[in-house]
Image: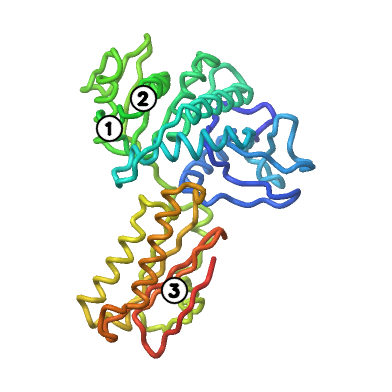
Amino acid sequence: MATANGTGLIVLANRAPLTVTRPGHIKRSASGLVTALEPLVARCAGTWVAHGAAPDGHGCVDHRDGLSVPPANPRYRLRYVRLTEDEHRGYYYGFANEGLWPLCHAVGVRPIFRSHDFRMYHRANSRFAAAVAEESADASPLVLVQDYHFALAPRMLRRRLRSSTIAAFWHIPWPPADVFGRCPWATMLIDGLLAADIVGLQTPDDCRHFLDSVERLLDATVDREEGEVTWCGHTTRVRAYPVGVEWSNPAVCAAPPSAVCRDEVLAALKLPPCVRLGVGVDRLDYTKGINEKFLAVERLLERDAALRGRLVFVQVAEPSRDCLPAYRAARAQIVATSERITRGSDRPRANRSSCWNRITSRPRSIACIAPPTSATSAACTTA
């Protein structure tokens, strides 16, 4: 049972597994990271430290912005960390997602690095590290630091909790050393990560790129055969640990059979039962290839006339980071592609496609691409 003083396992992540929207009302987060890690934290009666705050007047929150979850049958502790609007903008939207995110994804979006954003990133990492130290039940917890939002946190935690075991997981690609070195604070980020006992990346290539970056930027001892780095008297193991989702988790077990799900989608979109149904589920992000999927469906319908009137592609996209120009541009591109496919003005009518698309600020949107037939009509629903 999680206690108000925390336990030996602590997860540090930007996103909380749930949000208290108002007293007595809890909304779960739509996140692969949450889906993968929450069962572990619950099983170990651990603590999850994340950005956010419960609304004023929520009786379950203690003086440290923490609460036991789920409230009716507590299995672990959630600790919120409050940031000012300026801190959150600079740390999350600025340095993490206008800087590191495009730097690490080779998708043609130019990373933007600002000194003010890095100051907010440093300040936020310090605030989160302080919260983890407060939540530790002893001086030697196991701390799982999640993702590119917290590259500086392992060093800060090592200073506060010298006997702790720290594992830092970088859930996005690690680019080649010459690319990562374009970040003005690349050396500080690597120094921060190397205070962890383990640095986990997605693939062996990511591990190789990480070790290349260490050799390029630091005078550290790198043992490539063992996958270890020794820096400032501390040895860090570098391993590929692709994150996975427990297949038998409650959400999967509670889902109806696939045939029932298919029937529900067809009914919601007013589609005939004979269609072949394709489904994509993604966060709305320029790295997810949603526009390319639309173009691929269009090309497939152009090349295989037998699929016209028989194939429907449904895209579920959760809007995110709408305040950033690159995300607004990606969203506009997707909408433009949808509208162009719908019009099909440059093709014979028999070769046109219809696309119904609604992208809003609501949690999820559905875009439906289908070749026109007398049995289908323009329909779009939000989930």
Mark 2: secondary structure? helix
Q: Quadrant of the N terminus?
A: top right
Residue at image x 45%, y 34%? 95
Mark 3: secondary structure? strand
Visible in this render: residue 179?
yes
Q: Quadrant of the C terminus?
A: bottom right
- Give the image location of residue 149, x and y in percent: 47, 34
- Marker count (numbered): 3
Residue 86 located left or right of residue 67: left
Say if mark 2 contacts mark 1, CB within 8 Å: no
Amino acid type, callout 2: Ala
Q: Earlier in the sequence, mark 2 or mark 3?
A: 2
| Disc 3: CA contacts within 10 A as few (<14), some (14-19) or many (>=20) | many
Say if mark 2 contacts mark 3, CB within 8 Å: no
Q: Is residue 358 above or below residue 248?
A: below
- Give the image location of residue 332, x and y in percent: 42, 60
Q: Is residue 56 above or below residue 345?
A: above
Q: Nearer the viewer, residue 136 or 192?
A: 192
Say if mark 3 contacts mark 1, CB within 8 Å: no
Amino acid type, callout 1: Val
Q: Of the numbered discs in the image, which one, if any, rests on residue 179? A: 1
Amino acid type, callout 3: Trp
Q: Of the numbered discs in the image, which one, if any, rests on residue 80? A: none
Please name the residue that numbered disc 3 is placed on: 356
Q: Is residue 53 above or below residue 378?
A: above
Q: Of the numbered discs in the image, which one, if any, rests on residue 186? A: 2
